[in-house]
Amino acid sequence: MVLSLPDGAVSGEESDHPHASARSGDFPRSAVVLARMRSENFPVASRILPHGLRQHLHALYGFFRLVDFAGDEAPGNRDALLDFLEVDLRRAYQDTARIPIVRALTATVAECGIPHDVLAKLIEANRQDQQVRRYRTFDELLDYCALSANPVGEAVLHVFGRAEPALIALSDRICSALQILEHCQDVAEDYRQDRVYLPTDDMRLFGCQEPDLIASRAPTRLRGLVKFEVDRARRMLEAGAPLVGRLSGMARVAVAGYLAGGRATAAAFAAANHDPLGSDVRPNRGRTFVEWGRLYVLGGTW
């Protein structure tokens, strides 16, 4: 069966009313989705990169964020939107996609040889979000990251023609670490959506209760837990850092930027005393650029 929704409900075209609120079944406009790049922890598509590569990275980012919107923010039936995205993703591989952001992906998947299954995992992760609200162990969380984060890095490696098994394995460590850092930043926002991405076993170990996640400031026990998870993520970043040294040219530039953003985010947590509630923990741009240069020159070593 082919799922179909009304054309106007899924178009994602520029609206005549730019300040109109989202309706059930709507996808956001392309410009709104791409504008979110500025709020990421890392440079998504640096202006240093050639125009063609930046276009591919923009196309991927637009798709990733569109899937997240369908699973996290969309009013109405999110499962139906995810089903429609799954159908339209298949259409992108046939050059018949209907949603503008997915149509923009068509050239990228064709020219870069990105397998359908890689991108479909992002949709599966967001389907899982509709059902699974807690993760008991860190290993369970990593299984979720294998769907929600790791395919992003694999797709990027395809853009640079370096999607080799050994490099994908290193990329997976970086991407999972970046996801965990983001979860630590967003503990309050996630909890308000009845989602907790801090493993419940770890919360119990540190004596944390779920109401701690929306306090005005993080209590000592929660700061200890956040530090524990951030340190884990930092070790994973460094375990994946040799990927930079295995790359060259523009691939090295881009991946060094992603890893630099992760390092700068971990540093921002330390500067905030690991309290994501009392302050907005964001990586310092200067620290990111310093780490970026160091990584590019040294190839992933300290």
Image: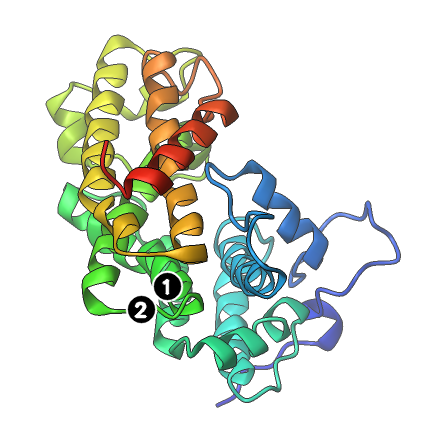
Figure coloring: rainbow
- Left or right, 258 with respect to 133, comes to right
- Left or right, 89 with respect to 151, comes to right
Residue 294 drawn above or below residue 170? above
The residue at the point 22 percent across, 44 percent down is 135
- Whole-percent x, y for residue 32 in the image: 69, 50
Q: Which of the two discs, 2 and 1, labels the residue nearer the N terminus?
A: 1
| Residue type at tag 2 | Ala
Label 2, residues with CA under 10 Å away: few <14, some 14-19, many ≥20: some
The residue at the point 33 percent across, 27 percent down is 266
Q: Is residue 40 visible?
A: yes
Q: Quadrant of the C terminus?
A: top left
- Left or right, 61 with respect to 294, comes to right
Circle 1 residue? 157
SS type, badge 2: loop
Of 120 and 285, nearer the camera is: 285
The residue at the point 48 percent across, 56 percent down is 71
- Whole-percent x, y for residue 133 in the image: 32, 46
Where, by quadrant of the figure, is residue 221 drawn? Answer: top left
Residue 17 drawn above or below residue 115? above
SS type, badge 1: helix
| Residue type at tag 1 | Leu
Label 1, residues with CA under 10 Å away: few <14, some 14-19, many ≥20: many
Circle 2 residue? 163
- Whole-percent x, y for residue 278 in the image: 44, 12
Q: Which mark is residue 88?
A: none
The residue at the point 55 percent across, 78 percent down is 88
- Whole-percent x, y for residue 9 in the image: 70, 68
Residue ranking furthest to the right? 16
Of 131 and 292, nearer the camera is: 292
Question: Pointer 2 and pointer 1: residues touching (CB < 8 Å)?
Answer: yes
